[in-house]
Amino acid sequence: MHRDPTTLDEWKSTLVAALGLVIVSFVAWYGLSRLSETTAGDKIGTATTVGLTIWLVSQTWYYMTQVKSPKRQLLLMGISFIQVVPFLFAAVYGSFGYNDLCVVGAKGPSDVLYFSYVTFTTVGFGDLHPAGLCRGLAVAEAITGYILLGLFVAAAVGIYARGHSQN
């Protein structure tokens, strides 16, 4: 079993990785959700969807096989759960364009980000709803939200249980 990090120096690489996740997801959302209507559309949206799928699979593999410290896993999954995944899904929604092509009622980047968080958390207020291919993306986002929440809770319980069994 790998020892959990205790000093700031030991946490440095994990904090840099977490900051990198936040920056990349913000830049992707910022850039892709602001594409002009002539640039955005099915080709860009589909390519972005493929990129998101590859990213999600690779990150899941990385957390489960390469990050050995439960506390590091918990931090990275928490950041992914709170910020990274909803921002990346919002980037994909925005890359399809507006005019009700992907998210009916979305007028700009803040609307697709709002829709992404509502979908990721499976709240589903109903004021915005997906259309076309984005219906499948919304389902995938909701399932991703369930899975990430489950992994996050399992990691938190594991850390808590391990800490109490050592006392």
Image (spheres, rainbow, N blue to C red):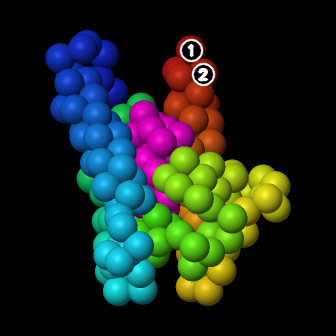
Residues at marks 2 and 1, CA–CA distance in whole angstroms: 5 Å
Callout 1: SS: loop
Q: Which mark is residue 18?
A: none
Q: Is residue 155 left or right of residue 36?
A: right
Q: Is residue 62 left or right of residue 46?
A: left
- Is residue 87 magenta-colored? yes
Badge 1 is on which residue? 167
Question: In the image, what residue occupies the spot 20% across and 24% down?
Answer: 12
- Picture quarter with the C terminus: top right
Tell me if mark 1 has few (under 14), some (14-19) or many (20+) residues whose alpha carbon lies within 10 angstroms of its own: few
* Corner quadrant of residue 46: bottom left
Question: In the image, what residue occupies the spot 36% across and 67% down?
Answer: 36
Question: In the image, what residue occupies the spot 53% across and 32% down?
Answer: 159
Pick the residue in front: 109 or 153: 109
Question: In the image, what residue occupies the spot 72% across and 69% down?
Answer: 129
Report the predominant secondary structure element of the magenta stretch.
helix
Residue type pointed to by label 2: His
Badge 2 is on which residue? 164
Residue type pointed to by label 1: Asn
Q: Position of residue 153 (x, y in %)?
A: 62, 42
Q: Is residue 120 left or right of residue 85?
A: right
Q: Position of residue 38 (x, y in %)?
A: 35, 77
Q: Which residues are magenta?
A: 73-91
Are dots 2 and 1 in contact, CB under 8 Å?
yes
**Res. 114 in view:** yes
- Picture quarter with the N terminus: top left
Q: Is residue 46 left or right of residue 139?
A: left
Up the image or down, 7 lies above or below 113; here it is above
Q: Position of residue 4 (x, y in %)?
A: 33, 27
Q: Position of residue 43 (x, y in %)?
A: 35, 86
